[in-house]
Each structure stands twice: as C-alpha cells, then as structure tokens.
Amino acid sequence: MAPEDEVREEVVEETHKKVMEELEKIYEDEEIEVFAAPDDSELEKLLLEILKEKPMKFKELKEVFSATAGEDRLRRSLMKLLEEGRIRELEDGTYTAIDVEDIYSTVEDEELIEDVLENVEGEEEEEELEELEFDEEF
C-alpha cells in the first residue's frame, strides 16, 4: 500500500470515530454497540462538518459512513449540498465544503463565486417577497 493510501485510511478511521461520537447510542453491552442512524438533515450536517475539516472523495466518505448511512442516502445528501452551493466537487473527484466567508481568498473560480452569491441573494429576495405577501394579506 502506498504511503498516501495509509494516510487516507487513518483519516477515514479518525473521521469515522468522530461521526460515531455524534450519533445517539441506543444499546450497548460487552459485545456490541448500536447507534441510531442519522436522519437526512443530520447526515447533511455531518457531511458539512467533515468536509470543512478535510476534503474527501466519495469512496472515503462511503467508508466513513459504512455502518450509518447507505450509499444512496450519502449520494443524495451530497447532491443536495452541491445543488445548494454548500459544497463543491473538485476536478479529482474530491468534495470540499464552501466557506462563504473565505470564498474570495480561497477560490479563484469567479463563476463559482457568482453562483454562490446568486443563490444567497435569491434566497434573501424570496424571503423578502414572502414577508411582503404576508404583510399584504393582513
């Protein structure tokens, strides 16, 4: 095994431990521990926390969540976070979280910056319109 792979295995194991610490333990005895699986919003939150700390490939994330979330749920959560502009997929297939505060200093892709800002501005405009519509009703 190449040294880079060994480091990644250590990262996967360490990250898996962090995920397990976040989950509710529902049963434990001398031989087994049983944890509640995260719901979709918890899975998204965990993915964001992980990807803020360390960019990871899908294969690594799949190993991290091997006992807690199926591959389909993991893909669905990643796709949702991608669509929302909260994470991005790099050219090598690595996923990383987008920190909007650091986006100007860490990302040179101007189109990505514009997309993220448009999503944020669009959400704010929708909220303002909803408030105006609510006020007009009363």
Image (cartoon, rainbow, N blue to C red):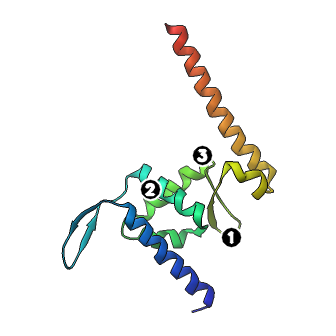
Residue in view at x 62 percent, y 85 percent: 4
Secondary element type, mark 1:
loop
Secondary element type, mark 3:
loop
Q: Residues within 10 Å of mark 1 (few under 14, many from 20)?
A: few
Vertical arrangement, residue 107 with respect to residue 18, above or below: above
Which label sits on residue 92?
A: 1
**C-alpha separation, residue under disc 2 versus residue under disc 1:** 23 Å
Residue in view at x 66 percent, y 39 percent: 119
Vertical arrangement, residue 63 with respect to residue 86, above or below: below
Could one spot residue 69 in this view of the protein?
Answer: no
Q: Does residue 33 appear to the left or right of 119 in the view shown?
A: left
Q: Looking at the image, tell me whether mark 2 or mark 3 is earlier in sequence order.
A: 2
**C-alpha separation, residue under disc 2 versus residue under disc 3:** 15 Å
**C-alpha separation, residue under disc 1 versus residue under disc 3:** 21 Å
Kind of residue indicated by mark 1 = Asp
Q: Does residue 34 appear to the left or right of 48 in the view shown?
A: left
- Pointer 3: what residue? 84
| Labels 2 & 1 near each other (Cβ < 8 A) | no
Secondary element type, mark 2:
helix
> In which quarter of the view is residue 72 placed?
bottom left
Q: Horizontal and vertical percent for residue 118?
A: 71, 38
> In which quarter of the view is residue 20 placed?
bottom left
Vertical arrangement, residue 4 with respect to residue 127, above or below: below
The N terminus, quarter of image: bottom right
Q: Looking at the image, tell me whether mark 2 or mark 1 is earlier in sequence order.
A: 2
Kind of residue indicated by mark 2 = Leu
Using the image as rendered, state which of residue 112 and residue 107 is in the foreground. Answer: 107
Vertical arrangement, residue 88 with respect to residue 56, above or below: above
